[in-house]
Amino acid sequence: MSTHATATREADGPDRRFDGPWLRVLAVAVGGWTVLYTLDWLVLEAGTPAGAVVGFTHAYILAPLATAAILLDALSLGEQEIADFGLFKWLYALVALFVPPIAAVYYAHREWLKPADPNLLSDSTGR
């Protein structure tokens, strides 16, 4: 089983870009989770209303959002035949439910899988 991408089709236009909108969502979710988790761990006490709100937000909103962003990004790259993560996308998603900063490892893997064909990654204007 090979996890390295190969360019198989010609560029179809602007929708063939390697950097999709899910990376922004992932960055916001992971950044927010990190800030709130740190705030919860260092400053807030368990059992207080503020601690409950922050704990709920990082555990039940931002962690699943990061998980969804990882899956949607990986699935969109696979659907466009740009990069195939195989089983790794599900492993990243499972870990991201508990520790969203795994997104840094996902991003490094994503960059490693970036195809070498520059036509595949650019839109029709040559940017």
Image (cartoon, rainbow, N blue to C red):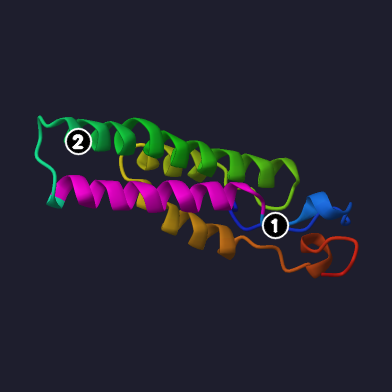
**Considering only order in the chain, which callout, 2 or 1, is on the residue closer to the N terminus?**
1
**Looking at the picture, how far across and down is residue 18, in whole percent?**
70, 57
Label annotation for residue 28: none
Q: Nearer the viewer, residue 24 or 50?
A: 50
Taking the image as shown, residue 80 lies to the left or right of residue 88, namely right
Q: What element carries label 2?
A: helix
- Determine crowd level at label 2: few under 14, some 14-19, many 20+ residues with C-alpha closer than 10 A: few
Total labels drawn: 2
The residue at which mark 1 appears reads as 18
Q: What stretch is highlighted in magenta?
A: 20-41
Callout 1–callout 2 Cβ contact below 8 Å: no
The residue at which mark 2 appears reads as 50
Does the segment drawn in magenta span residue 29? yes
Q: Distance between the residues labelled 1 and 2?
A: 39 Å
- Looking at the rendering, in which quadrant would you find the C terminus? bottom right
**Looking at the picture, how far across and down is residue 3, in whole percent?**
58, 53
Q: What's the residue at 43%, 58% (across, down)? A: 104
Q: What element carries label 1?
A: loop
Q: What's the residue at 67%, 42% (across, down)? A: 76
Q: What's the residue at 9%, 40% (across, down)? A: 45
Q: In which quarter of the image is residue 10?
A: bottom right
What secondary structure is the magenta-colored segment mainly? helix
